């Protein structure tokens, strides 16, 4: 999904020469966490409530005489409304930030925040948690943070494998990995690139690089029959068992991915592939 929903008709914008007290009042009166700083139609910086606490109060500066230019964070990382939720999450992780202004044709048109992404369930919780961990770790040892993140990423992936093994009565995690690779890889290639990215964004991050590296779709040669045939070949099972494995993936993924995303995926699939998730809906009813 794009970031167009975060366009704002009204934004709090101040001049770099404005005193810090103006930003503090704007934060309080508008119940926001940051103000944007702009001059001559260009974004020059951003001042957060944390900046006010640390760079002004913490350093004993006079809020009446200190200018925003002296305490703002600059330059500012920005995105376009046409960019995706995943682009925003990636930028927040890379830059250790929680807010990204949206610029269109050189004009400030909105802002997307970490809280927005969290409330809109725009990504798996482990990805959003990584943004917070990156900020907690800033200024301290990075290795423990990275280690915890890697451990959590692996644990999330292993839970998915365990869930599929139980659903499909598979004996080993390796078999579950093969089933996911075949079925999800085929479904991703059957979708348009944008829809594929949206689906991948809700899957465990451990799986995402391999799925994103697949050739872009939609590959209309992919059908439920071709997926089941691939499982027969890879796992040396009979066609009936292959059909069961495909259905098990449908159940597992439906339990992991938002209902809206499943509906979007179903809308792009032909009837034979749509039935993978249709069977799930009927079973749940």
Image (cartoon, helix red, strand yellow):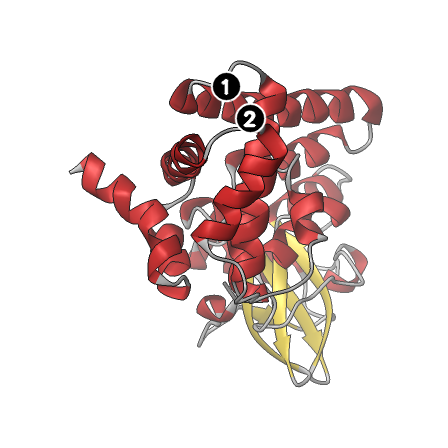
Q: Position of residue 76 (x, y in %)?
A: 74, 62
Residue 137 location, quadrant = top right
Earlier residue among tags 2 and 1:
1
How packed mark 1 is, by other alpha carbons closer than 10 Å (few <14, some 14-19, many 20 or more), is: some
Drawn side of residue 156 relative to residue 249, left or right = right
Q: Which mark is residue 176?
A: 2
Q: Which mark is residue 132?
A: none
Residue lying at 66% horizontally and 67% vertically, measured from the top left? 79
Drawn side of residue 40 relative to residue 190, left or right = right
Q: Position of residue 284 (x, y in %)?
A: 21, 36
The C terminus appears in which quarter of the rendering? top left
In this figure, which residue is indicated by the disc labeled 1? 162
How packed mark 2 is, by other alpha carbons closer than 10 Å (few <14, some 14-19, many 20 or more), is: many
Could you give the CA–CA distance between mark 2 and mark 1, rounded to whole angstroms?
8 Å
Q: Is residue 8 above or below residue 263?
A: below
Q: Secondary structure at mark 2?
A: helix
């Amino acid at each position: 999904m794009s970031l167009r929903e975060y366009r704002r008709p009204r934004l709090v914008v101040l001049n770099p020469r404005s005193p810090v007290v103006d930003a503090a009042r704007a934060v309080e009166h508008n119940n926001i966490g940051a103000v944007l700083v702009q001059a001559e139609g260009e974004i020059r910086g951003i001042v957060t409530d944390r900046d006010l606490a640390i760079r002004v109060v913490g350093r004993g500066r006079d809020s009446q005489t200190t200018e925003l230019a002296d305490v703002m964070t600059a330059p500012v990382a920005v995105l376009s409304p046409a960019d995706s939720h995943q682009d925003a999450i990636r930028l927040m992780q890379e830059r250790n930030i929680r807010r990204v202004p949206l610029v269109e044709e050189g004009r400030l048109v909105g802002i997307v925040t970490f809280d927005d992404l969290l409330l809109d369930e725009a990504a798996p919780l482990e990805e959003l948690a990584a943004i917070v961990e990156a900020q907690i770790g800033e200024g301290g040892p990075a290795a423990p943070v990275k280690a915890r993140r890697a451990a959590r990423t692996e644990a999330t992936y292993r839970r998915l494998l365990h869930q599929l093994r139980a659903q499909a009565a598979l004996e080993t995690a390796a078999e579950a990995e093969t089933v996911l690779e075949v079925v999800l890889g085929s479904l991703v290639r059957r979708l348009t690139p944008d829809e594929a990215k949206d689906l991948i964004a809700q899957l465990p991050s451990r799986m995402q690089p391999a799925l994103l590296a697949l050739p872009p779709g939609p590959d209309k040669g992919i059908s439920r029959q071709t997926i089941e045939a691939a499982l027969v070949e890879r796992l040396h099972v009979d066609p009936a068992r292959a059909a069961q494995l495909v259905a098990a993936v449908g159940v597992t993924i439906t339990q992991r991915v938002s209902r809206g995303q499943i509906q979007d995926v179903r809308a792009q699939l032909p009837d034979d592939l749509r039935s993978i998730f249709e069977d799930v809906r009927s079973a749940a009813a």
